[in-house]
Image (cartoon, grey):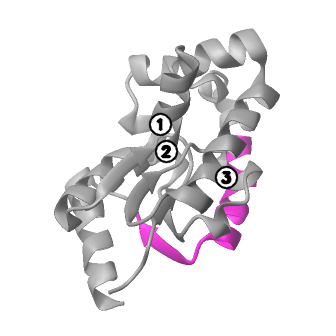
Amino acid sequence: MKFDNLLFVGFMGSGKSSVARYVAKALKRQFLDTDTMIESSEGRTIPEIFAQEGEPYFRACEKEVATWLAHDVHNTIVSTGGGFAIFQPICECGTILYLESSFEEIVARLNQNELSKRPLLQDMDQARALFEKRQGIYESVAHYRIDGSGSVTQASQRVLAFLESL
């Protein structure tokens, strides 16, 4: 199995960060989370960025991260935000895995604290519509699709087994 960067895409709450962290540890690779990087560089949370600056500003921050990943980051496992694949040119950043989960499973995984951190999940009807809209986009940018259902360990082991088969 040979790849440079490995980027996880999927809807908010699909387990991208947890699975990517697990895979990075198993493969002894560096792990990065694009949302965490933006929060750190901005000195504020994503809900604060959305409330104070709006979504376009946040997407501009993501674009800076995408450019950096494409040009300066190698041999790294990257978890991306739910909209990263939609708004940023990520194909230049590495091999893309779409971690697929159903909307119902995603919502069931998230406790109230997690839901409150995700501005685009405040209205469940709008969130479901967004989920349905983004599914096709994730599928179109992904090099590979992985079943993200079940526990973090189960999904992570499916990813590792798949990577070994390459």
Q: Residues within 10 Å of mark 3 (few under 14, many from 20)?
A: some
Residue 151 in view here = no
Q: Main secondary structure of the magenta part?
A: helix
SS type, badge 3: helix
Q: CA distance from mark 1 to mark 3?
A: 31 Å
Amino acid residing under circle 1:
Val
* Front tag of 3 and 2: 3
Disc 1 residue crowd, few under 14, some 14–19, many 20+, Cα 10 Å:
some
Q: Is residue 135 magenta?
A: yes
Q: Are marks 1 and 2 in contact (CB under 8 Å)?
A: yes
Question: Going 27% across and 58% down the picture, which residue do you hit?
Answer: 24
- Residue 85 visible (yes or no): yes
Q: Give the percent coordinates (x, y) of residue 105.
A: 43, 46
Is 141 inside the magenta-drawn segment? yes
Q: As displayed, is residue 62 above or below residue 141?
A: above
Q: Secondary structure at mark 2?
A: helix
Check the image and name the residue furthest to the front.
72
**Split into 4 quadrants, where in the image is the C terminus?**
bottom left
Q: Bounds of the magenta span?
A: 128-147
Please tell me which residue is depicted at 44% across the width and 64% down the height of the picture: 74
| Residue 107 circle label | 1
Task: From the viewer's side, name the closer residue of 72 and 37.
Answer: 72
Please indicate whether residue 150 sits to the left or right of residue 128 in the image.
Answer: left
Residue 31's label in the rendered image is: none
Where on the picture, by quarter, is residue 30? bottom left
Screen quadrant of the N terminus? bottom left
User: Which mark is drawn over residue 104?
Assistant: 2
Q: Earlier in the sequence, mark 3 or mark 2?
A: 3
Find residue 65 and report its image quarter. top right
Q: Name the amino acid, label 2.
A: Glu
Mark 2 Cα-neighbour bin, 10 Å: few <14, some 14–19, many ≥20: few
- Residue 67, label in figure: 3
